[in-house]
Image (cartoon, rainbow, N blue to C red):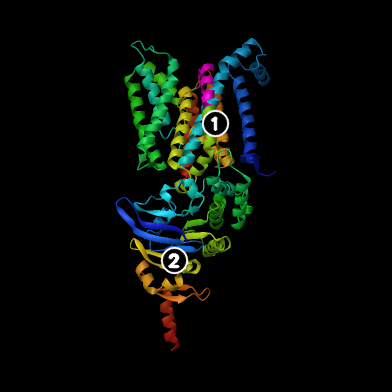
Amino acid sequence: MKRYVPFRIGNISFLMNYRSIAYVIGLVLLTIILIILSLGIGQLKVSPLEVVRAVFDSSSDMNNLVVQSFRMPRVLMALFAGAGLAVSGAILQGMIRNPLASPDIIGITGGAAFATVGFLAFFSDRSNTLTVSIQWLPLASFIGAIVTGFLVYFLAWKKGGIKPIRLVLIGIGVSAAVQAFTTMIMILGPIFTASRANIWITGSVNGANWSEVWTIIPWFFLLMAILFVYVRRLNVQELGEDLAANAGSLIQRDRFMLITLSTSLAGIAVAFAGGIGFVGLMAPHMARRLVGSSFGSLIPVSALVGGCIVIAADLIARTAFAPLEVPVGVLTSAIGAPYFIYLLYKSRNQ
Amino acid sequence: MDAIRTNALTLGYGEEDIIEELDLVIPKGKITVFIGGNGSGKSTLLRSLARLLKPKDGSVVLDGADIARTPTKKIAQKLSILPQSPVAPEGLTVLELVKQGRYPYQSWLNQWSEKDEKAVQRAMEVTGVKDLSERKVDSLSGGQRQRAWIAMNLAQDTDIILLDEPTTYLDLTHQIDILDLLSDLNEEENRTIVMVLHDINLACRYADHIVAISNKNIYQQGDPDTIVTPELVANVFGLRCQIMNDPHSGTPMCIPFSRGRRKKDADHERKMDA
């Protein structure tokens, strides 16, 4: 079968890549399998068939309750948080033209952590009870991510534009600075805040509920829809500044938009799931191995790979050490850190 | 007829000027080659013609309009540039690369019109990379890779093509191969080619018009047969040489005066003969 096939209706036309479509279908199947596995495994074991029945409310009451109310929101949160981080990383890697870029490295996650810890410390009274509803915490995290993203962007601005390498270096600097503040608040604050903040910083989908899931889903699809319009621009950005200018793109305007999208996608993920590390680095890199660098294929594949990584990591994190439950971020970092070192090692000669 | 013209163009980075008040006319439908020593500003000049570098002063005029005031997409339909040794993103296929040349003609819903497809297929045919279309750019040899990049520029379908040292890092066979391809594009499709070349002998063979750059301005310009002299080479490159006619093409050929093993051997042999 031919790999590239044009799709045309009137003035709408695209070049479809059948190989990538096959990968997307394969990954969707893998994701479904992982979701069913994850919904079935735990203290109460539910067989895959019963899981499917429970999703449609036709298993035993106990199964229905565990699958629908306890496990489902958690698994979906893992899926969308992983996908958001992965796509955020894919955008940054393409724009910065460096496979080592990711939302954790340029400070987006660090900013969200700072806002989270600040929120917990600032809104706690003497008896360590929160004075405002915990429901506002994701908003604080999201604002932290966005504000840091733009802080980095504007600090990197020089002579009418940003250079990707400046963005990375300033991101690393800002990241280190906010981390210092985060640590300071944790040390000065009560133990309660520190332990709670620590779980957030590591990243965890434990305790995710349906209302959070219904918040992240529309945002995720809205951002992905806007990104779809920008795929073409991301593709020329990836050729580097000179060739993007040659092609007639408005480089700085596109960069601003792409950074906004990348920061927002990482922001919604960390707002609910915390700073799950290295997914934004690993997933797009693995996706590139599968389908190459063209973003029409790379974005959906990255999203699915990211989602699968976090679902699988969370499944292991909550079952392998039972009855102890490890935050999912510990698992992703345990795989991610060596992966990062491997990438560094591989690119040492470039 | 002129393809591009500059008016009192001053270029530079920071405080220092690299080109000062340059008036240049690039003839239409010809091959123009910029020559000059390292750091003479020939690449800088080429980049500014393609709006990759903003002039400090003066202007670049394309089709009677200042490029600084023309929408960038409009320029991209008239002029394309291939920077020096570009790097393709990991895993990008030749087709996906060449397709990027169609960017100035696309919109987000219309990304692969029949016209786009024809232009891309033709560009790949002309440059001989059609059979490689599904191969990854980073897996190609240097010569094939350069052809793929030129195909991208051709897909952009512009009358003017600028190239910054298109033969760098290629062996002699592939250097000739790329220059023959550009020469064909100029003759058969009447495209205006402007490029920077390091090799003065190849520049003389392929150029209709040579622009020698030295001292922040044009030292001399014109037909290589008339302007390339020992005096020009001495003043532009700081090299003493003899100019002969290339026995193959009849164009000027530069024989540098240099120390070297061969000459001593020749002297020695002459003595032995005597």
Residue A259 drawn at (x, y percent)? 45, 35
Q: Are marks 1 and 2 on the same chain?
A: no
Q: Residue at x 51, y 26 (%)?
A: A81
Q: Which residues are magenta?
A: A205-220
Residue A135, image x and y in percent?
45, 16
For the question of whether residue B119 can be seen, the reply is yes
Name which quarter of the figure residue A109 lies in: top left
Secondary element under disc 1, as helix, strand or loop, is helix
Q: Nearer the viewer, residue A264 or B216?
A: B216
Image side of residue A203 versus residue B189, left or right: left
How far across and how far down the image is residue B178, in percent? 54, 61
Is A241 above or below relative to B176?
above
Chain name for mark 2 = B
For this orientation, the residue located farthest to the front is B64
SS assignment at label 2: strand
Q: Nearer the viewer, residue B174 or B22?
A: B22
Q: CA distance from mark 1 to mark 2?
A: 51 Å
The chain ID associated with circle 1 is A
- Which mark identifies residue A225? 1
Binning the other alpha carbons within 10 Å of mark 1 as few (below 14), some (14 to 19) or many (20 upward) gives few
User: Percent x, y for residue B174?
Assistant: 54, 62
| Residue bearing the label numbered 2 | B210
Magenta-colored stretch includes residue B258: no
State which quadrant residue A72 falls in: top right
